[in-house]
Amino acid sequence: MAREHTRCLIIGSGPAGYTAAIYAGRANLSPMEYCGLQMGGQLTQTTTVENFPGYPQGVDGNQMMMDLREQAERFGADIRDGIIVKADLSKAPYVLTTDRGNEIEADTVIIATGASAKYLGLEDEKKYNGQGVSACATCDGFFYRKKTVAVVGGGDTACEEAIYLAGLCKKVYMIVRKSFLRASDVMKKRVADNEKIEILYEHNTLGLYGEKGVEGAHVVKRKGQPDEQKYDLPIDGFFLAIGHKPNTDVFKEWLDLDEIGYIKVIPGTPRTKIDGVFAAGDCADPTYRQAIVAAGTGCMAALEAERYLNVIGK
């Protein structure tokens, strides 16, 4: 199959990818953008986005992403379904291969692949996926109205998920590995003040059980201690909120990643160690992980790509 050529290839379609496409399009770079596994990125898994400037009443996450996509297309972005499964960044122009086997030759590459929710690694998570196991309360919480659920995790995300679910469910357990919450003081207080939420400290999940879906979790309290206690916790839904893994495996051979997998950039820039290859959004942001920050870095990456192309005369 013949290789296609583009001056600017954008990989990913969250706020970072779409913003990069808007800026690259307006700079006449005719960007090509591959949407990846989750078109619109993580924001499509939330209901209302309330902290993005310009939306005083909040905005639906899916709607916001559709608006960004439309804006990028208006400026000439060639937006495509598909995933980049292979990268050769050994020399410019860089060659990237899609899941359909198409090869794209790119003068510049903007990586905006985001991050995905982490799972505990239990076999039962796969077994009951879509039948009681979820990594997104706002996507699936509706199905558990007036039921009992558990949220795994002790950080801000877990607290947010628990509070959201408490608005729908009869009872919410938080399964927390440590003897304390890692969350911010504001979130700790909100959880403490919510009578529907019960925190199970020093608990680990061993497995799940149920005939036609999740009916409960096998848990252990104070694992490995003399007073260790195993018991079954009846629940209807099991929500994961234990962090994220950056979607960067395809680039690890070429770029510097931190121990979790976030792409290392030159501080204050979206530049990677390879000229003409930039990283934007959550795949390179272990700290903030906010839509507005992702959009900002998408803009930066597109501006850097334009400057780089001018320098090399492409």
Image (cartoon, rainbow, N blue to C red):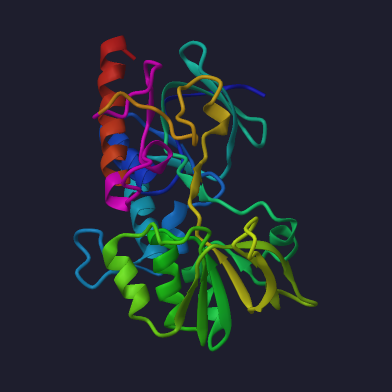
* Residue 110 lies in the magenta stretch: no
Task: Answer above or below: position of 233 versus 295.
Answer: below
Q: Quadrant of the N terminus?
A: top right
* Residue 269 lies in the magenta stretch: yes
78 displayed left or right of 2: left
Which residue shows up at 37% across the image and 74% down it?
A: 191
Q: Nearer the viewer, residue 39 or 78?
A: 39
Q: Nearer the viewer, residue 31 or 124?
A: 124
Q: Quadrant of the C terminus?
A: top left
Q: Extreme front residue here?
A: 226
Which residue shows up at 30% across the image and 42% down it?
A: 22
Q: Which residues are magenta?
A: 268-293
Q: Is residue 198 visible?
A: yes
Find residue 159 and report its horizontal and vertical position in percent.
40, 67
Find residue 210 and report its horizontal and vertical position in percent.
76, 75
Residue 190: quadrant of the picture: bottom left
Task: Answer above or below: position of 56 versus 269.
Answer: below
Find residue 82 and report its horizontal and vertical position in percent.
58, 42
Residue 147: quadrant of the picture: bottom right
Could you tell me what secondary structure mostly forms the magenta stretch? Answer: loop
Find residue 120 and report its horizontal and vertical position in percent.
62, 54
